[in-house]
Image (spheres, grey):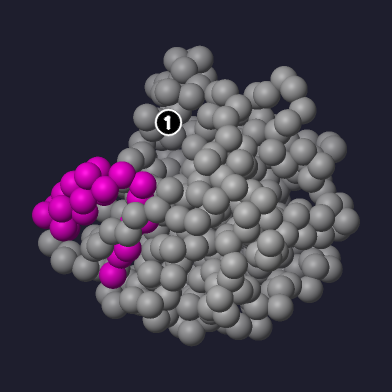
């Protein structure tokens, strides 16, 4: 299928009528001493806007400092149906193990069958949790996403937690077999399409959506007129950051739309994490700060906390680092307008849901 050959949608594949796009300002929600609309407290707000202290909190040091103030949420995820994308390496694999340890009924969506099945067996052996299965999809291909979403709807009926973790940074501009730029397809359009297709399944259980973003998104504004990074020169890190900015924007739109259905939607970023992807895509950065990078388990911690925490369930539309809400805009010129939010939604929707 090329981008000009949109797949025809059956009724189950169609989204709801769509969100009211006046996202405006989300109301102050949840518990805790939050001073700002984002949920951020004074100290986090000041650190975020001081840039250097904020970036320091992305490191291993930031994790170790933050965890001193945590209390662990009780309970397990037993019987909760969790769908995790990109769970075979790096932060995603660490999250898969941690979710299985919490007794989740876990489905990992991955591209490579052999690798996925090996990870599945490793997790079952390590955790003793037999409720781990895999489904195959290339999350940069919309046809694969359509098929795996249908498979999930048919076999799971309801979904308690969707974690959109899969993502990749490509140093050269490439296009998928469907004609989409690869970073955009994998890191933004695919996230949008999978989530839209699973909203009804999530609504049946008043579920949660957790979107994994990146601290790199702070440096970029969404470019709604160049979502596929056609304007030269192509920069892989910039394309990745723009896509992750888009994920944060979608998080706020979904939060407002889905609140009435009992679905909590949050975004998080894992900090600077030592993963194979970072080593491969950003070797200079890895060499410079390697000893300050977090472990994959440290990077995945907030993801698991958002899946378990009742505090997270009582709020929606926030952006988290180390179990605390943070600002989404710190650099001048990176905040999108309401018109740009609407344009982003309409363009993504048109690409995956328009009939030929």
Give the total number of marks visible in the rendering: 1
Q: For residue 341, say whether it is visible.
A: no
Query: Quadrant where the C terminus lies?
Result: bottom right
Name which residue lies at 43% across and 48% down: 138
The answer to whether residue 330 is magenta is: no
Assess disc 1: are there few (<14), some (14-19) or many (≥20) residues with their C-alpha within 10 Å of its C-alpha.
some
Q: Which x, y percent locates residue 331?
A: 78, 36
**Residue that label 1 marks:** 277
Does 178 sit above or below residue 235?
below
> On the picture, is 159 further left or further right than 262?
left
Whole-percent x, y for residue 5 in the image? 63, 54
Element marked by disc 1: helix
Height in image: 3 above or below 12? above
Rendered image quadrant of residue 273: top left
Q: Which residues are magenta?
A: 105-127
- In-front residue for pair 128/155: 155
Q: Give how far across and how far down residue 241 sits, in percent.
A: 64, 37
Q: Position of residue 185 (x, y in %)?
A: 58, 45
Q: Is 303 above or below relative to 272?
A: below
At horizontal 84% and vertical 52% (from top left) the residue drawn is 340
**Residue at 50% across, 56% down:** 143
Q: 63 and 172: which one is in front?
A: 172
Residue at position x 66%, y 69% from top? 255
């Amino acid at each position: 299928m090329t981008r000009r050959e949109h797949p025809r949608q059956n009724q189950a594949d169609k989204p709801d009528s769509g969100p009211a796009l006046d996202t405006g300002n989300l109301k102050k929600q949840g518990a805790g001493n939050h001073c700002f609309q984002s949920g951020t407290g004074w100290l986090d707000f000041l650190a975020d806007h001081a840039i250097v202290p904020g970036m320091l909190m992305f490191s291993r040091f930031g994790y170790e400092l933050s965890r001193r103030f945590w209390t662990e949420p009780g309970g397990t995820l037993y019987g909760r149906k969790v769908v995790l994308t990109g769970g075979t390496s790096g932060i995603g694999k660490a999250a898969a193990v941690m979710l299985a340890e919490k007794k989740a009924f876990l489905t990992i969506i991955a591209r490579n069958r052999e690798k996925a099945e090996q990870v599945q067996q490793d997790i079952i052996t390590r955790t003793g949790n037999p409720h781990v299965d895999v489904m195959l999809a290339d999350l940069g291909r919309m046809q694969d996403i359509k098929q795996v979403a249908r498979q999930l709807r048919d076999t799971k009926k309801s979904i308690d937690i969707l974690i959109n973790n899969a993502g990749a940074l490509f140093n050269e501009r490439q296009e998928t077999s469907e004609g989409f730029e690869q970073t955009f397809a994998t890191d933004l359009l695919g996230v949008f399409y999978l989530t839209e297709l699973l909203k009804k399944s999530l609504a049946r259980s008043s579920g949660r959506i957790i979107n994994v973003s990146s601290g790199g998104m702070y440096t970029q504004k969404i470019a709604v007129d160049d979502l596929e990074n056609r304007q030269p020169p192509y920069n892989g890190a910039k394309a990745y950051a723009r896509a992750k900015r888009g994920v944060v924007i979608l998080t706020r739109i979904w939060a407002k739309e889905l609140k009435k259905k009992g679905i909590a939607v949050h975004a998080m970023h894992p900090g600077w994490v030592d993963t194979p992807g970072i080593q491969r895509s950003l070797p200079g950065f890895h060499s410079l700060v390697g000893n300050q990078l977090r472990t994959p388990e440290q990077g995945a911690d907030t993801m698991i906390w958002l899946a378990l925490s009742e505090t997270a369930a009582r709020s929606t539309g926030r952006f988290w680092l180390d179990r605390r809400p943070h600002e989404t805009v710190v650099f001048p010129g990176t905040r999108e307008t309401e018109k740009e939010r609407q344009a982003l939604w309409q363009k993504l929707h048109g690409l995956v849901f328009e009939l030929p």
